[in-house]
Image: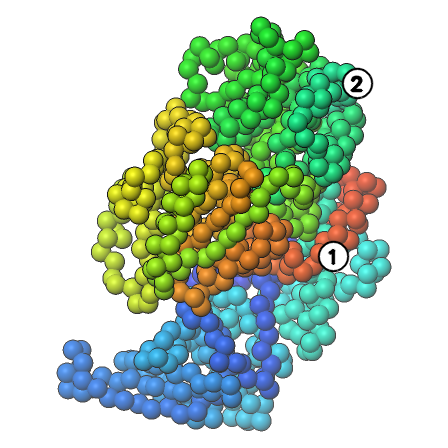
Amino acid sequence: MDPVPALEEPLKKVLGPATAKVMAEHLGLHTVGDLLHHYPRRYEERGQLTHLADLPMDEHVTVVAQVADARLHTFASAKAPRGKGQRLEVTITDGSGRLQLVFFGAGVHKPHKELLPGTRALFAGKVSVFNRRLQLAHPAYELLRGDGDGAEETVESWAGALIPIYPATAKLESWKIGKALQTVLPSAREAVDPLPESLREGRGLVPLPEALLKIHRPQTKADIEDARARLKWDEAFVLQVALARRRHADAQLPAVARRPGADGLLAAFDDRLPFTLTEGQQKVSAEIFADLATEHPMHRLLQGEVGSGKTMVALRAMLAVVDAGGQAAMLAPTEVLAQQHHRSVTEMMGELAEGGMLGGAENATKVVLLTGSMGAAARRHALLDLATGEAGIVIGTHALIEDKVQFHDLGLVVVDEQHRFGVEQRDALRGKGKQPPHLLVMTATPIPRTVAMTVFGDLETSVLDQLPAGRSPIASHVVPAADKPHFLARAWERVREEVAGGHQAYVVCPRIGDEEDDPKKAGRKKPASPEDEAEKRPPLAVLDVADQLAKGPLHGLRVEVLHGRMPPDDKDAVMRRFAAGETDVLVATTVIEVGVNVPNATAMVIMDADRFGVSQLHQLRGRVGRGSAPGLCLLVTEMPEASAARQRLNAVASTLDGFELSRIDLEQRREGDVLGQAQSGTRSSLRVLAVIDDEEIIAEARREATAVVAADPELERLPALRTALDALLDEEREQYLEKG
């Protein structure tokens, strides 16, 4: 048997089972290589004290500080009624602030001997507040012994001037991770370098073994810079090679070129449009038509602000394909949205959507709807129209993907709201063409350019950033319900005013309200602060809020509810009544987030707005202001003014620019999710690369990767890069990359 390469050696063989178990369970580290790529979050300097004044509440922190004083108190307690209970209070300082450490009971003896005034140490624990003072209860600590202290050896892990502070957990402090790294660091010399030598030398990057040594044991700040610059390139480049290989493979596939006729269906549709397309719509349409005319499948991401007219661009692409003798399918994430798209497409097309019917135009086609809840007869009819080619356009949910669905000649697949579909669904639909169909993916979630290059890197990107003429601005305000209850009362008055003016309103809640109550949560202890109170209570629910509004502040108005667990026919009936103006206020979950279009709805109140993400709030807000009257969006929250949640809501209220908001969203989530935590269950593959800040590196890595793959698609001349790629594209990561 071949020996296991040093970096693939399991940690349990090298570090001992207990430490290895914690590393695997809490940090996702299994091999020596995993641990070497667990980089320090920051560095403390021996001569420089940590700022205690800036410690975050409720977080695990590691600080370097000096003991100012230590006092042992004896007290009576239930366990020690004769006054034998002991509490050690140690005050540490760093010049900027002071922090109290508390030790109880049997845990007092060792620190009482070791933490004498003047001693310097690393302390780690969770920051809490007691009697209005910051404290760490029972922190772990590691003494920093001066070099001149002959009696004690300097702790080897901290021999350098720069002390690495690692992302740690309550079960494993930063310095224990540092000691474990000390053990495996010699293996770094065997790390295989994935970067082609010409690229590394051309950019003046240090070799990988040197970068790993410098990031974990830097002698100077310049060492850290060298290491980070190199490791960022690794992450950006290997990822871009994975994406470039997908683009290259897709470009080899054959497809039927689809060119619209000069006086066919598309021309007839354009002639009947009551408005001119925006400059952006014309430009993006030209890009799409150029792709459709080639004999390789189009793979294009169309991102556009809420209401920028993406559906119009997608419809014109579908008509071009029907013109050229093919069929087009549009995949929507929910039945509500599929029905909405079907309604708006047939309305926009008029008699052009009545192919084979009396009154249908001469060059008309048929537009069919296919969803899981359709009756058997209607479904049979729709399937027949698809198989014979009678229907040029089909709009549906994942019901389109089922085995029974056969197309006569599928030429284009349009996927709405890409992030809601998995790769299996996208590929199953693409597999229904005789040859791979062209693919257009749409999203209303604006994505910063670098994220598009990183996450959707296998797709060409088009952006619609103008709003069509006649769209109204939306005013957004934060309503602090706990601090200022009268603001909430005023919000309901504003809704009544909008309805009195002939308009309609949405009220959005995070939860439906018919869920089983969790008995475990019922016996919860009383939370400590108002912020906790707001956090700990269950999110507001549609059914409760609708009932309270109908009996209280919106009494006399026509209030209805809409949520995902209603039978499909009921959902559709509710949406139709709202669209027809027969309902004044629709209390809903986020089922209305995407694509629902009721121009007469001008106001939206989002309850517990702090429970939604920035991009989601922006999406929801896009449901109002779709007509000529101005829109109003009120973000109701009980979170205190100083909280991060309030800052997030203030950001949403302050701008309508989705790209700006997506940057804020990303910065707040620290982009750990961008490449997958939420989707793939594994840790993000990005450790030092910051998607927002390293735009230039990502763009350059994309150029280099494209050139490398064009010259050597199978990477035969670059075996080390091939190995790094295989490590990145383990099962889960591959799926995530494909999901985009």
Provide residue 408's location: percent of width, then percent of height: 63, 13
Tell me if mark 2 has few (under 14), some (14-19) or many (20+) residues whose alpha carbon lies within 10 angstroms of its own: few
**Secondary structure beneath label 1:** helix
Q: Residue at x 33, y 65 (%)?
A: 530
Provide residue 637's location: percent of width, then percent of height: 40, 57
Give the amino acid type for the residue marked by disc 1 in the picture: Ile
Give the amino acid type for the residue marked by disc 2 in the picture: Ala
The circle drawn on residue 250 is none
Tell me the quadrant of the picture where the C terminus can be found.
Answer: top right
Residue 351 lies in quadrant? top right
Relative to 697, 201 lies left or right:
right
Asked if 243 appears above or below 282 in the picture, the reply is below
Q: Residue at x 37, y 49 (%)?
A: 492
- Front residue of this view, candidates 250 and 543: 543
Asked if 351 appears above or below 399 in the picture, the reply is above
Tell me if mark 1 has few (under 14), some (14-19) or many (20+) residues whose alpha carbon lies within 10 angstroms of its own: many
- Which residue is denoted by mark 2 in the rendering? 262
